[in-house]
Image (tube, helix red, strand yellow):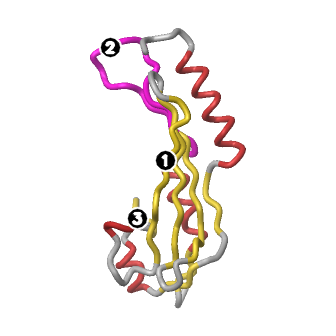
Amino acid sequence: MGYAPGSQTYWDSQVKEMCEKDGGVRVFERLLISRTDIDLLGRVDGKIGVPVKALAHPNAPAYAVNKVTILRQGNPGVWRSDWEIFRRVDQVVVARVTIYNRSGGDFPSPAHESRFTCPDLKQITSDMQQLFIVQGD
């Protein structure tokens, strides 16, 4: 489980390839929300967010549930996170967000392991805005 020259570069390219195939935001149905709903959902970097189910306000119109699939254990570790966004009123999945991650694979060092995420989390936050139709806008 130690350092293998080139493994970080190799796995970053694998993560990019998987990400290009099915990473990112897919919206199945848009959510009509009010300004009050935005307060219940919260914001991420100034944009409308969707909280995880355990932390979501009970009146929030949507919540997220994450399923993590380990693609490679060890160093580096590689995993896929599938976030399903549920509309609370009828429990229908209205969107899915797929993110790929690599952690580690660096030359041994006392510093923190490097990480690579695809798509970029700021891009995910921005792309999630297509899910919402805000009443009055």
Residue visible at 57% across and 45% down? 119
Span of residues in magenta: 101-119
- Tag 2 secondary structure: loop
Above or below, comparing residue 56 to residue 96 in the picture: below
Main secondary structure found in the magenta portion: loop
Residue visible at 61% across and 21% down? 10
Q: Which residue is mark 1?
A: 68
Quarter of the figure with the N terminus? top left
Name which of mark 3 and mark 1 comes first in the sequence.
3
- Tag 3 secondary structure: loop
Of badges 2 and 1, the one in the foreground is 1
Of badges 3 and 1, the one in the foreground is 1
* Place of residue 66 in the rendered image (x, y in percent of width and height, measured from the top left): 46, 56
Q: CA distance from mark 2 to mark 1?
A: 27 Å
Above or below, comparing residue 80 to residue 125 in the picture: above
User: Few, some or many C-alpha atoms within 10 Å of disc 1 (few <14, some 14-19, many ≥20)?
Assistant: few
Residue closest to the eye, 17 or 80 = 80
Q: CA distance from mark 3 to mark 2?
A: 36 Å
